[in-house]
Image (cartoon, helix red, strand yellow):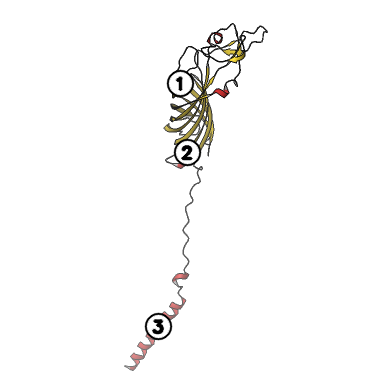
Amino acid sequence: MKGLFRVTFLIVAVCTASLSSFAQSAPKPDTVKKAKVPVPIKPKGPKPLNHEWSAGIRLNTDGWSIYTDLGKIKAKNPRQSDMFYNETFWQLEFTEKKDAREQKIDGNDPSGNPSKYVYGKINDFYAFKLGIGFRTLIAGKPDPGSVSIHWVNVLGASLGLLKPYYINVYTDPSAIKYSDATQADFLDQNVIEGSAGFTKGLDQIKFIPGGHYKSALHFDFSTNRKNVLAVEAGVNVEYYSQAIPIMANDKGVPYFVDFFIAAQFGRRW
């Protein structure tokens, strides 16, 4: 019995010593090095485009315009903002209106160096226009070499500048403008020497408030995502607080309706 007790005690002692040695030699949980998980590398794409500036010239059926746009690009997918996007922009424009009957002819000058003038014209009319525009995508660019098409709408305020048109005549040492008193000489080609020049009458400009609206299709042909190379074609409507007389014997109307085509250049960033 004593022998069995001694054997049992010996076995327990050996097991205890083995467990103690294993516990001391086993690494602590906080010292175990964790395996590094590789971070997936996102492929680098083109930087999203957010802004656009452009300038252009319009040929209207009743004159011409120069303008500039500054806009904010809005795209559902920022990485495709060069191909599929809408835009909100501010537009500043300067325009000159002309009557379809305007025609420059030579003045009556015996010296052989006649000055040109527009017969029957009584006023020059210009306008500054400020508007907010919306460019809506119709067809995007599936690849950089194709054309994107947008529908453009612009609405805003106009400030008309009505300037009297002066001519030089033999019967008066001073340049004259159209009035009831000068009507006979103003329309007599035999006494008209020519135009008095653009600067004559600048101090008599009359400001006329109004509004404008235009709608057009915008075709962007640029092959570079950061450049703007576009053509627009559409219709423009302007309305002013009073009639705008441009030619003699014509009371004029307070509105203008014209069709236009425009060339536009600019930059996106």
Mark 3: which amino acid?
A: Thr
Where residue 84 appears, as percent x and y from the top left, is 44, 36
Q: Which residue is mark 3?
A: 16
Q: Which residue is mark 1?
A: 259
Mark 2: which amino acid?
A: Lys
Query: In terms of sequence position, does the residue under pointer 1 or pointer 2 come before the other?
Result: 2
Is residue 236 among the parts visible in the rendering? Answer: no
Q: Which residue is mark 2?
A: 72
Residue that appears at 46% across and 78% down: 24
Residue that appears at 45% across and 80% down: 21
Q: How far is disc 3 from disc 2 in space, using C-alphas? A: 78 Å
Where residue 97 appears, as percent x and y from the top left, is 50, 20
Secondary structure under the numbered disc 2 in the rendered image: strand
Q: Residue furthest front?
A: 181
Front residue of this view, candidates 36 and 9:
36
Residues at discs 3 and 2 in contact (Cβ within 8 Å): no
Query: In terms of sequence position, does the residue under pointer 3 or pointer 2 come before the other?
Result: 3
Classify residue 2 as left or right of residue 235. left
Front residue of this view, candidates 7 and 219:
219
